[in-house]
Amino acid sequence: MFLRARTSPNFSSRRGGRSTLLLAPCLGALLGWALAGAGCSAGPRAATSAGSDSVEERRSRAAAGDVEAQLVLGAQYAEGRGVAADRAEAARWFALAARAGDPRGEHALAVLANDPVERAQRLERAASAGHAPAQRGLGLALLRGEGVAPDEPQAARWLALAADAGDAEARFVLGVLLLEGRGVEPDPVAGVARLQAAAQQGFAPAQRAYARALARGQGGEPDLVAAAGWLRRAAEQGLAEAAADLGLALLEGRGVERDAAEGARWLTFAAEQGIASAQSNLALLHLRGAGVPHDDEAAARWFALAAERGLASAQARLGALYESGRGVPRDEARAYAWYTLALERGEEAAGARRAALAARLSTERLAAAEALVRELTLRVAPR
């Protein structure tokens, strides 16, 4: 049986929370959102290359009170484009724009802030001034409890304002909240509509979420063909979770013609990005020689990666490989240890295999196996 990737996005930044979907991995991307409209809708990188004025000319205009120049110059210093990176200098220019009443300056200062309380306060000021990216940022902070007490109804309110202004990520997150009834009354039709709007804007996580909603028939009749198409769009943008989903759809022929080789390619991409379900599914393909060459050692390697990420079924399968010596040296103590971790994570089938091993291991080998359990528990991702 193949495994599906995590089905619901999680907006918590705390490990072990409902999810770890942190959607702006670099300062440039964050500033691009903060400065939307600063003569550079593509973000600060476009801004710093736009126009023919030199840094000194831009600095002169910024010093004379040109807010657009202040914002672009701040972005240059934040990113180190055309000047040496200097966060303090970036903050100085952003602060001038903020004092002039431009919410983009306040939002950029929020992005630069290391203190979550300060960040939330600046987001609220920019959001209250009507800046949609800050409204989305404040909504996410309220969902995550970053710098403010968690408050899902207030989060939904700010996200709705940003979504109504056309912010793609806000539409995506609000769509998920509407589907799950978090902070708002559940409304599958409205939720799917928000996801669709964000997906049509090219936002890859929304494309994946919309695909899953289509496949389940949330807000309407199921449409596996359309779902597969949206998964492909998200996967082609590099979203690893979507690649894992698309690979599985190709293996099972859900909405697309069955194609084990192409499915394996997408699973490989997702597995290389650390998606545990894809790693485990790719291991199964190697065991079976389906879409990839039969390779027990490769299967063991992929199961090991998924097992160390805390995937219980992969832990049980890795234990079975160690018990039989398939793809790895036979090691019953290590098999016992992986069965134990799998059982602790709810893989009930591992219990009988573990008990059988315990019955035939010597006292010394059982003690070694228990020590290995403790060692692996420290190394493996928490449940």
Image: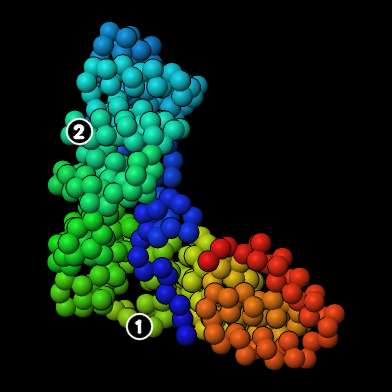
In the depicted structure, whether residue 315 falls above or below residue 162? below
Could you say which is closer to the camera, residue 101 or residue 258?
101
Which circle marks residue 253 in the picture? 1
Could you say which is closer to the camera, residue 128 or residue 264?
128
What is the three-letter code of the residue carrying label 2?
Answer: Ser
Q: Is residue 151 left or right of residue 18?
A: left
- What element does badge 1 sit on? loop
Q: Nearer the viewer, mark 1 or mark 2?
A: 2
Work out whether residue 374 can be spotted.
Answer: yes
The residue sitting at 32% across, 81% down in the picture is: 254
Residue to which mark 2 is pinned: 128
In the depicted structure, whether residue 98 falls above or below residue 197? above
x and y, in percent, of residue 273 in the image: 51, 60
Alpha carbon distance from label 1 to label 2: 48 Å
Which circle marks residue 100 in the picture? none
The residue sitting at 28% across, 58% down in the picture is: 206
The residue sitting at 38% across, 78% down in the picture is: 250
> Badge 2: few (under 14), some or many (20 or more) residues near its Cα, within 10 Å?
some
Q: Where, by quadrant of the figure, is residue 90 drawn?
A: top left
The residue sitting at 73% across, 87% down in the picture is: 358
In the depicted structure, whether residue 128 falls above or below residue 8? above
Work out whether residue 331 can be spotted.
Answer: no
